[in-house]
Amino acid sequence: MLERLVAFDTTSRNSNLELIHSVRDYLSGLGVASQLSFDESGRKANLYATIGPDDRGGIALSGHSDVVPVDGQDWSSDPWTVRAADDRLYGRGTCDMKGFIAVVLAQVPKLLNADLQLPVHLCLSFDEEVDCGGVKRLLTFLETQDVRPRACIIGEPTEMKVVTAHKGGVGYRCDVQGHECHSSLAPRGVNAVQAAARIIAELDGMARRKVSEGPFDHDYDVPHTTLQVGVIQGGTALNIVPADCSFDFEIRNIPQDDPQTLFDEIRNYARTEIEPAMKAIDPDCGVNWQTFCDYPALSLAEDSDLVTLVQSCAEANAIAKVAFCTEGGFFQNRGIPTIVCGPGSIAQAHKPDEFISRQQLAACEAFMERLTERLCDESIVGHKF
């Protein structure tokens, strides 16, 4: 199953329909109907299917079908063909997160033969690696259904640890419009690169303030909110005062921090400290902002019945919090309690020679076996997820 899924190049820029249709046909062959919800272009789709009683909500098992690009990465083998070596399975998406999807799909025949008291809902989404546009559309679709999931397990790679919280993440683009002139007349121009550099320096100061002042949550490996600039572009030649500069930055916030407040701080800095001098030379100069991705933080109460259920299935008493983002916050914000638990390590995600170990897949298979067993217990119906 993993080989089948990895063979589809579902890089986010591409259509995922071949994979989705393959999964739909696989489920149909087992007697399970699927519902698809598409993006505006019709080139991408989510898949939703229910196994078990259809008159009540159950447990959603959710995963994204898209993967990050392999462009410019030095792979030892074809990234779209699973290669087995040293008890590892290499290929793009093996870890993030087609390994989990493969285990869930392989479990479907056993789910069909089980006397489930609560159903299992299969959720496959698109564009998680871009802007989570897929899961937003999926959740809107679910709101039109008579029955929707009572809880959700997202199988992002956590090494099968039970993750009850993760940071939020917001990506912003800052476009600085300056005034071009010959560099010998630099004071008559507005240098967009230098204006952007001052804003970036302010962001760096905010980031260092978070390191020293918090707030802190030491359950995270990085116990505070982080701010960082990832991409910058500007200028055309050394002897031209640059008219344009743009940069992308992100805020990854612990749930105690409000990213909007931090964004307002940097925007106000640019408005009061940068733009007046720019506009004094040319009123058309200025700084513009846009948000291009926004992942809400996840935080699930530790005494939730969902935590107890997932801990028992994972045979783990501990819980964890992680710095990477998932679709979990979107489910939670729609009133569906969500937890993250899946095979593989995030340290392998997005890298060349991405892999998942057979041991992790086996642990996930055992998790699914226990989950199937527990969903057959009549007492599960009364759980307050």
Image (cartoon, rainbow, N blue to C red):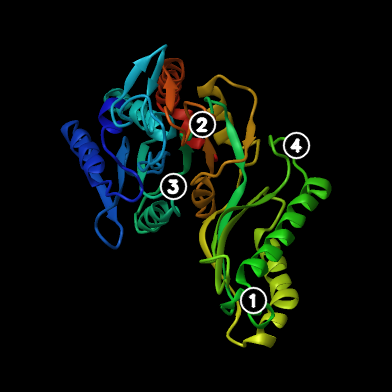
Q: Position of residue 63 (x, y in %)?
A: 40, 39
Instruction: Name the amino acid type tagged 3.
Output: Glu
Circle 2 — which element?
loop
Please report contact status of discs 3 and 4: CB closer than 8 Å, yes or no: no
- Distance between mark 1 and mark 2 Cα atoms: 59 Å
Q: Residue at x 59, y 21 (%)?
A: 316
Residue bearing mark 3 = 129
Please report contact status of discs 1 and 2: CB closer than 8 Å, yes or no: no
- In the picture, measured across the screen, residue 253 lies left or right of residue 353, that is right
Instruction: Name the amino acid type tagged 4.
Output: His
* Label at residue 341: 2
Q: Earlier in the sequence, mark 1 or mark 2?
A: 1
Instruction: Name the amino acid type tagged 2.
Output: Cys
Q: Residue furthest front?
A: 184
* Label at residue 184: 1
Mark 3, residues whose alpha carbon is within 10 Å: few (<14), some, or many (≥20)?
many
Q: Earlier in the sequence, mark 3 or mark 2?
A: 3
Q: Earlier in the sequence, mark 3 or mark 4?
A: 3
Whether residue 111 is visible to the viewer of this picture, yes or no, is no
Q: Quadrant of residue 197?
A: bottom right
Residue bearing mark 4 = 218
Please report contact status of discs 3 and 1: CB closer than 8 Å, yes or no: no
Q: Quadrant of the C terminus?
A: top right
- Distance between mark 2 and mark 4 Cα atoms: 20 Å
Q: Quadrant of the N terminus?
A: top left
Residue 278 vertical placement versus 211 (above, below): below
- Distance between mark 3 and mark 1 Cα atoms: 45 Å
Q: Position of residue 100 (x, y in %)?
A: 40, 30
Mark 4 or 1: the one toward you = 1
- Distance between mark 3 and mark 2 Cα atoms: 18 Å
Circle 4 — which element?
loop
